[in-house]
Each structure stands twice: as structure tokens, then as C-alpha cells.
Amino acid sequence: NPWGEGKTTFVKMWRQQLVNQKFKTLYFNAWENDFEQDVLIALISELGEIKNKPVNTFNKVLEKAVSLTNKIIPAMAKHVAKKTIGDEAAEAIIEGVAEYGAEELKEQINSYTSRKKSIQDFKDNLEVFVDEIDKDKPLVFIIDELDRCRPNYAVEVLEQIKHLFSVPGIVFVLSIDKEQLGHSVRGVYGSDKIDANEYLRRFIDLEYSIPEPNLELYVNYLSGYFGIDAFFESEERLKYKVFKNDKENFIGFSIILFDQKKMTLRQIEKLYAKTKITLVQFNYNSYIFPTFFLTLAFIHSERKDIYRKIKRKEYNLQELT
């Protein structure tokens, strides 16, 4: 789902449900952790947060991870990876020999072989670790806000999950705006022609979109949460018959406005928070004119240029209408 539509709230509530059902779970906010240059360190640190984990087995996972935190990728491997098998690959090897020399080439090949073995050792130990945590239920690892990260970091998280953490017993849940993450993928690979959807299919087995919320329920909830109901329904205010429909008008117009403007849940929440701050400036016997009041609040949030012109009285009546 796009930003501001409740993904984080959803996965945190889902996580609590899983905890209630005795699942081991982890929640990793990728955006808050993209200061860490090495993704592997960040992900393993999250594993370390599991309560009552088998310490000895976890230490073995740490031990195997040490050789994988090195950022140096064999230059020869990168060079050959860009070529297809056959004559081109053979030419690449010849070029590599000329460029690096026989000894360097031997070192790079040994390093590459060693790294492949280290990856498998790490995965083997990780599988044992996960199995010891719970033999019956998988470890559910939730990764949130991946689409907000630096593009390089976001793509590296995906690659590390795929190549290092894809072992039996771990289920990853990605809470993402797929469109935004697709932009990151294209940015990293330097081409708008990259099929980001096809790329992401390598990592995602099942997709689920949060359905659109019931606006009336959400607006009524926020109205109570921010105390807007309390203002419109206060005894002091209801002494005046002219104000008795203010709450109904405010809620009704809110639903129409938010639906027409296709506002996200976060945008609506922030607008209602601002509305509450503004309402406390009014006396209980003040005229509010709910529909016009909410329109001004909306313009102030979404179109400050127009709001300033209204405030400076730069519109005539026809232009304002």
C-alpha cells in the first residue's frame, strides 16, 4: 500500500496477534536503521533480540557471519559476472589474468570459493538456530519502511534476505509501498527500463493489500480520539440550539471532503490533530461554521499558498468562491 495507509499499524497489530499465538517474531524498521552501512550486521542484531534464544547456537551464527561482513567483492568475480558463459567468459578470464596477474587471480578465486563456503556455513548454522528457537512454528521476521530507505540500502536488504536468510523456519513479511520500492530498484541499477515488478517477484511469494478503510468509522474514531466530539457536544455549547447540528455537519462534510480528495489515513489524522488545536482557541458560544472551518483547515494543510492569499484578502468574493 502507498505511504500513510496504515501498513505499520497493521503489521504491529498482526505481530501482537502472532505473539499471543506463541510465535517468535521480530520487527525491523529498515528506515530507522539505514544508518548502519552493513545490512548483515543490522539483521543479525535483530536476531539477537529474540528472548530465551539458544545462546551457544546464536554465537555460532555470529562466528560464521564474521567472514561475510567484508564489503570487498572479488573484482574478478564481478568482471566475469557481467559476461555470459562461453567464449565471452573465456575472454574475460584472459583479460582478468592480464589485469591482475596470475597470483592476484589465484587469490581472488580462492577468496571467492571461501566466501561461497562461508555463506553456506552461515545458512546451515542459522537453520539450526531457528529450529532450536521453535521446532513447530516459524520465526516471523517483519521488515517495515523498506521503501523509505536509501535505494542502495533497500536493495541490499532484499538481497541479503534472499541469499543469506532464506532458510527453512524463517518467514519474512515485507511492509512496503511496492511502487516506491520499484523506484529504488531502478535507481540502484541505473535504468528506467528495469522491470521492477519482475525483480521483486524474486523475493515476494505472496502479496496482500490492505483494503480501503471505512471512512465514516475512521472519522468518527478520530473525532473521539482528538476530543472534537467533546467540544461540539459539551453541555455549555448545546445550550445554544443553533449549534446542535455542528458535529453532524462537521463529520458529514469530513467524509465527503476526504473521499473526494483521496486523502491517506495519515493525512486525515494530521488534519484532525490540527483541527483540535484550533478548536481549543474558540469559546463554547462561538460560531464555528463547520464546513467552512474544515475547508480552511484543509487548505491550510494542503495549499498554503491559497491560504495565505485568503488571509491577506487577495481574492475578491467571486475568486474566493
Image (cartoon, rainbow, N blue to C red):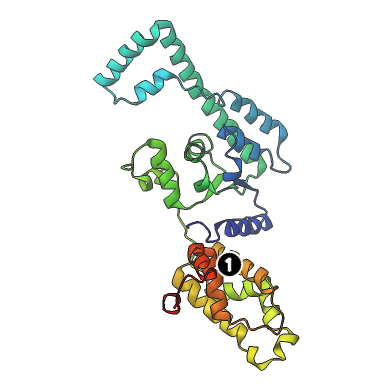
Q: Is residue 93 visible?
A: yes
The answer to which image quadrant residue 254 occupies is: bottom right
Along the viewing direction, whichever of 268 and 161 lies nearer the viewer = 268
Q: How many marks?
A: 1
Q: Is residue 89 left or right of residue 187?
A: left
Above or below, comparing residue 315 to residue 178 in the picture? below
- Residue drawn at (51%, 39%), measured in percent from left and top? 157
For the C terminus, the image quarter is: bottom left
- Residue drawn at (61%, 45%), measured in percent from left and top? 28
Q: Is residue 30 visible?
A: no
- Residue drawn at (52%, 27%), measured in percent from left and top? 119
Residue lying farthest bottom? 241
Along the viewing direction, whichever of 153 and 120 lies nearer the viewer = 153
Tag 1: residue type? Leu
Secondary element at tag 1:
helix
Question: Residue 15, position in %: x, y?
Answer: 62, 55
Question: Residue 134, position in %: x, y?
Answer: 65, 45
Q: Is residue 258 left or right of residue 13?
A: left
Along the viewing direction, whichever of 126 and 258 lies nearer the viewer = 258
Question: Residue 66, position in %: x, y?
Answer: 61, 25
Which residue in the structure is indicated by mark 1? 271
Would you call the spot at circle 1 few (<14 residues within 10 Å), some (14-19), or many (20 or more)? some
Question: Residue 158, position in %: x, y?
Answer: 49, 40
- Residue drawn at (28%, 16%), measured in percent from left and top? 90
